[in-house]
Amino acid sequence: MQSVLVVDDDPFIRKLVATTLEDVGEFELHEAADGLEALEIAQRERPTLVFLDVDMPRLDGIDACRRLREDPTTGRTTIVMLTAAHGDDVERRAEDAGADLFLTKPFSPLDLLRLVDRLGSAGGPGARRS
């Protein structure tokens, strides 16, 4: 069973991702409302996949992504950045921090399922893209 951490300060987004994934597979789901909480949960649960919002209180997604990458226990986790911001600057900063993929908000459950399917066919979570 894959462990998935969904990190977003918007409870609706967390619920959308969790509900969508619950409907299609065997996922052990964890949720966090900000980057600091995400780091605590990631240390404990060691997820194989993290959906991480860019803009959050206490610790934003870019800094949380960087810290996840620096930690040996989470360094190989697949990180999908969730962002409402369009633009190369956000994506460049997230890629520099170690993000694997991006999902732009608003997204549909179908967009999410396609992304998860793409990850599965690319070697699964933990298989970083090159």
Image (cartoon, rainbow, N blue to C red):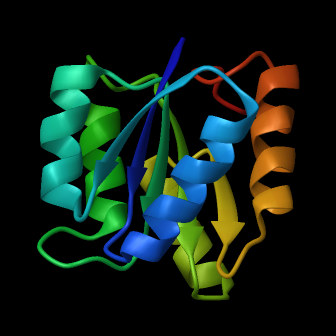
Which residue does the image show at 58% across and 55% down from the upper left? 17
Q: Position of residue 98 (x, y in %)?
A: 47, 46
Quarter of the image holding residue 112?
A: bottom right
x, y percent for residue 16? 58, 63
> In the drawing, does residue 29 fall left or right of residue 30?
right
Instruction: Using the image, determine if residue 71 lies above or below residue 112.
Output: above
Counting the numbered discs, the total is 0
Residue 32, position as x, y percentages in the image? 26, 54
Residue at image point 79% right, 24% down? 120
Q: Horizontal placement of 126 versus 3: left or right?
A: right
**Hey, which quadrant is residue 44 in on the image?**
top left
As drawn, the residue found furthest toward the top would be: 1
Between 21 and 71, the residue placed more toward the observer is: 21
Residue 56 vs residue 13, the one in the foreground: 13
- Kindly identify the residue that appears in the image at 68 percent across and 64 percent down: 103
Is the N terminus in the top left, top right, bottom left or bottom right quadrant? Answer: top right
On the picture, is 100 further left or further right than 123?
A: left
Which residue does the image show at 83% across and 60% down from the upper left? 111
- Seen from the viewer's position, the closer of residues 28 and 49 is 28
Q: Image quarter for residue 54? A: bottom left
Against 49, is 16 above or below?
below
| Side of 72 relative to 75 (left or right) | left
Quadrant occupied by the C terminus: top right
